[in-house]
Image: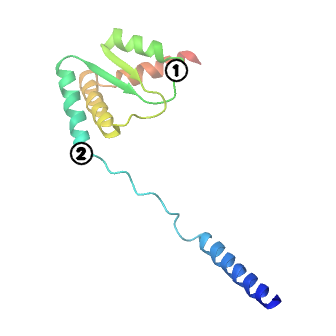
Amino acid sequence: MIRAIVVLLSIVLIGIRFATAADKQHPSEPASQPAPRQVDQKEVEAGRATARADIGNKLIRYDIVGEPSMIDPELKRLAASKYNIAVTFHGCRAGPRIDYDRAYLEVVMAHLKALYGFDPVASLEKELREKQK
């Protein structure tokens, strides 16, 4: 009986040793990273096409993703009154159509930079943040 208990404990200890050894990663080994997210080219093209159509219809929508700020209402008002840009805020998380949204904004920003030589929304945001200090 004692011999059976000793054998059983030995098996358990060996199993624990193997489990902890497998869990420990050698410092020289790179940490396992999740696979990079695949860009959906159909969404990218759809975002670009929609942005071009909106710009052609004189609708410039500028989406901002990030932590809400006290300057958001003023930024929205100034962008609309000075540059006819509709700024929308989406909080801390990007929407489900990440590739579409990024492509849309890239086209809008390229249009604004071609039109004004700079990004008016980023410029207004910088001015408002400086005033806030």
Left or right: residue 121 compared with residue 110: right
Residue located at (30% from left, 29% from top): 109
Residue 60 spot, x, y in % from top left: 27, 20
Q: CA distance from mark 2 to mark 1?
A: 36 Å
Image coordinates of residue 17 in percent, x first then y, are 68, 78
> For mark 2, what is the residue?
41
| Quadrant of image for the N terminus | bottom right
Point out the residue furthest to the right here: 2
Give the residue number, with chain letter if any, for mark 1: 129
Q: Residue furthest top?
A: 81
Query: Within 10 angstroms of label 1, few (less than 14), some, or many (20 or more) residues?
Result: few
Q: Quadrant of residue 56?
A: top left
Which quadrant, please, contains the C terminus?
A: top right
Side of 105 where 11 appears, left or right: right
Q: Nearer the viewer, residue 32 or 9?
A: 9
Observer-side mark, 2 or 1, equals: 2
Dot 2 amino acid type: Gln
**Depth order, front residue of 21/130:** 21
Residue pictured at 39% horizontal, 54% vertical: 36
Along the horizontal axis of the image, is 92 left or right of 112?
right
Q: Determine whether label 2 and label 1 are within 8 Å by CB.
A: no
**Left or right: 91 as drawn, with respect to 107:** right
Tag 2 secondary structure: helix
Percent position of residue 92, x then y? 49, 32
Outermost residue, front side: 1
